[in-house]
Amino acid sequence: MNIKDYNIRDTMEGLDEKVEIIYKNQSLLFEYSGIARDYGKGFLMTEVEAHTLGYISKQEGLTATQLSAITLRTKGAVSMLLNKLEQKGLIERRNKGSDKKQRKIYLTAKGKQAVSIHRAYDREKMLIMLNALLQECTMDEVDHFFKVLDCRNRILKKSYKKTV
């Protein structure tokens, strides 16, 4: 099905409001992801740092270039982020032979603990969010929201790759 299959008047009605809802959501998420918070037991991190640790935990031995592709961040931004995580004692980078460009990234014991604590935090907050959503939406609507959001992410990722 395509947008042409719908009545254009119905499609255009409320389009500006939909654009504004998406923009506000993106702005809120951007601000939220940059706030340092204590995820428990003294692990003060931003959401970006915490989720980056999560990516590393799923595929230890990544290079910064690989992490850049996964996170859709520039190599420079990833390098700065990795420096922060290393200073906090959450990761370590090891050279692969004499090639410093192929440094592999690993979690430290402290980094593994931070990932575990952050995942528990995220699960707790997601349950709170789901309960709040269910005050105004049905479970089917919530499930559809996540399906649409996942689809939108795939579309945006394709679009992003074309511009990089």
Image (tube, rainbow, N blue to C red):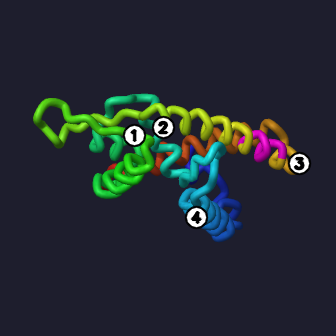
* Residue tagged 2: 111
Q: CA distance from mark 1 to mark 2?
A: 6 Å
For residue 139, say whether it is visible.
yes
* Residue tagged 3: 135
Comparing 19 with 56, the one in front is 56
Q: CA distance from mark 2 to mark 3?
A: 36 Å
Q: Quadrant of the C terminus?
A: bottom left
55 in the magenta segment: no
Q: CA distance from mark 3 to mark 1?
A: 40 Å
Left or right of 137? Residue 159 is left
Please tell me whether the stretch drawn in magenta is mainly helix, strand or loop: helix
- Which region is colored magenta? 126-131
Q: Secondary structure at mark 4?
A: helix
* Residue tagged 1: 91
Left or right of 88? Residue 69 is left
Q: Position of residue 139 (x, y in %)?
A: 81, 37
Rendering quarter of residue 93? top left
Which residue is painted at 77% across and 39% down in the image? 127
Query: Crowding near pointer 1: few (<14 within 10 Å), some, many (20+)?
Result: many
Q: Quadrant of the N terminus?
A: top right
Disc 1 + disc 2, Cβ < 8 Å: yes
